[in-house]
């Protein structure tokens, strides 16, 4: 009897050892996932020129996977997690197809703007509102300048002056560019992007959340720039728009908090052909409102004029106008006032 019991125990032990040799498929796959350091995404790739390069391991459009969660899932569930789109983490994810931290302006307005119009709300009660990036004189406006389009508003400052974010948002670009110099681009939840160029120093990094008025860099004269100033742009789905249509730079406030942006605006005001028309209109207006005197040209100030606008229209500088008229650069102008040009 004892011999029979020993025999049965030996058989059961043998079957148990044999069963342990067979492990479920999911465990084997998970084990491979942990120990295999040469996944396809990390292997060298050949470029068109035949040179080897390493594939990017950090894709800014993907959500990082939590290994502790992956280990509990089957292979099929793992693939599902990999395809989770992290654009949800970025502002205006419903309007933009990507979050690009390398290319300055990767977006095409004609491809992205599918409607005839869109309502833009600049600030919400829950955010920090609007702050002027730098309180200085406008020295160059949106439009054509020296046979080249100028897509921003230039604000006079000194190298080292602090530059702040105009609205709450997330930094998309923070790097050195040949044309913009040190540049920061911030994406906002209403679909706008604001550009801050020619900085001497960048104080933020891509992916960082910032609030309106928060210092993002120091003013400078880097890139394609002649003299220290801030080049400030507002763009909607890649289309540059005239910031002075929406911001009163002299008072440092928004003209309206809610605006309707249309395709017609782009066609009549913001594309290259429209910029030519705007420039001609400004030049004609200058000729009509300017007269000659023994001091040379005299300009009659109109509502909304700034020293920067007057200087640009009359092909001179703010400094020269102030010197001729014995005034300071921060002097407030009044409609009807006459200035020697």
Image: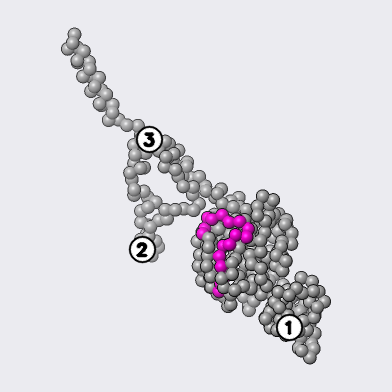
Is tag 1's residue or tag 2's residue first in the polypeptide sequence?
2
Name the image quarter holding residue 190.
Answer: bottom right
Over which residues does the magenta segment extend?
205-221
Residue 206 shown in magenta: yes
In the rendered view, how is the structure colored?
A: one colour
Q: 324 above or below 124?
A: below
Contact? badges 3 and 1 (CB < 8 Å) = no
Tag in front: 3 or 2: 3
**SS at mark 2?**
loop
Q: Is residue 306 left or right of residue 156?
A: right
Measured in 3D between alpha carbons, the distance from the residue under mark 1 to the one under mark 2, in whole angstroms, is 64 Å
Q: Residues within 10 Å of mark 3 (few under 14, many from 20)?
A: some
**Residue located at (39% from left, 51% from top):** 41
Residue at the far bottom in the pictured view: 294
Q: Which residue is mark 3?
A: 26
Contact? badges 3 and 2 (CB < 8 Å) = no
Q: Which residue is mark 1?
A: 326
Measured in 3D between alpha carbons, the distance from the residue under mark 3 to the one under mark 1, in whole angstroms, is 83 Å
Q: Looking at the picture, how far across and down is residue 113, in whole percent?
A: 64, 56
Is tag 3's residue or tag 1's residue first in the polypeptide sequence?
3
Q: If the image is split into quadrants, where does the N terminus sit?
A: top left
Q: Which residue is mark 2?
A: 51
Q: If the image is split into quadrants, where does the C terminus sit?
A: bottom right
**SS at mark 1?**
loop
**Residue located at (21% from left, 19% from top):** 10
Q: Residues within 10 Å of mark 2 (few under 14, many from 20)?
A: few
């Amino acid at each position: 009897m004892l011999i029979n019991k020993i025999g049965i125990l030996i058989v059961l032990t043998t079957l148990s050892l044999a069963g342990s040799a067979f492990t479920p498929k999911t465990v084997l796959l998970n084990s491979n996932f942990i120990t295999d350091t040469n996944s396809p995404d990390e292997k060298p790739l050949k470029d068109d020129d035949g040179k080897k390069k390493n594939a990017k391991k950090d894709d800014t459009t993907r959500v990082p996977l939590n290994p502790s969660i992956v280990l509990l899932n089957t292979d099929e569930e793992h693939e599902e997690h990999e395809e989770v789109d992290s654009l949800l983490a970025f502002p205006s994810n419903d309007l933009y197809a990507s979050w690009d931290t390398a290319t300055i302006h990767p977006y095409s307005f004609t491809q992205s703007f599918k409607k005839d119009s869109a309502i833009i709300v600049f600030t919400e009660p829950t955010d920090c509102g609007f702050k002027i990036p730098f309180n200085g004189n406008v020295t160059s406006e949106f439009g054509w300048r020296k046979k080249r389009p100028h897509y921003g508003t230039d604000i006079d400052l000194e190298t080292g002056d602090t530059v702040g974010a105009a609205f709450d948002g997330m930094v998309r670009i923070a790097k050195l560019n040949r044309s913009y110099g040190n540049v920061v681009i911030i994406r906002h939840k209403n679909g706008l992007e604001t550009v801050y160029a020619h900085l001497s120093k960048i104080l933020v990094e891509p992916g960082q959340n910032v609030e309106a008025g928060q210092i993002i860099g120091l003013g400078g004269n880097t890139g394609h720039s002649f003299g220290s100033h801030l080049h400030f742009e507002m763009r909607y789905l890649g289309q540059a728009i005239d910031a002075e249509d929406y911001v009163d730079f002299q008072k440092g406030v928004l003209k309206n908090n809610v605006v309707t942006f249309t395709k017609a605006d782009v066609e009549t005001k913001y594309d290259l052909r429209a910029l030519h028309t705007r420039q001609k209109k400004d030049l004609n207006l200058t000729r009509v409102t300017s007269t000659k005197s023994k001091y040379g040209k005299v300009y009659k100030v109109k509502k909304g004029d700034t020293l920067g606008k007057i200087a640009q229209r009359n092909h001179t500088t703010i400094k020269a106008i102030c010197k001729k008229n014995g005034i300071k650069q921060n002097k407030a102008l009044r409609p009807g006032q006459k200035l020697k040009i």
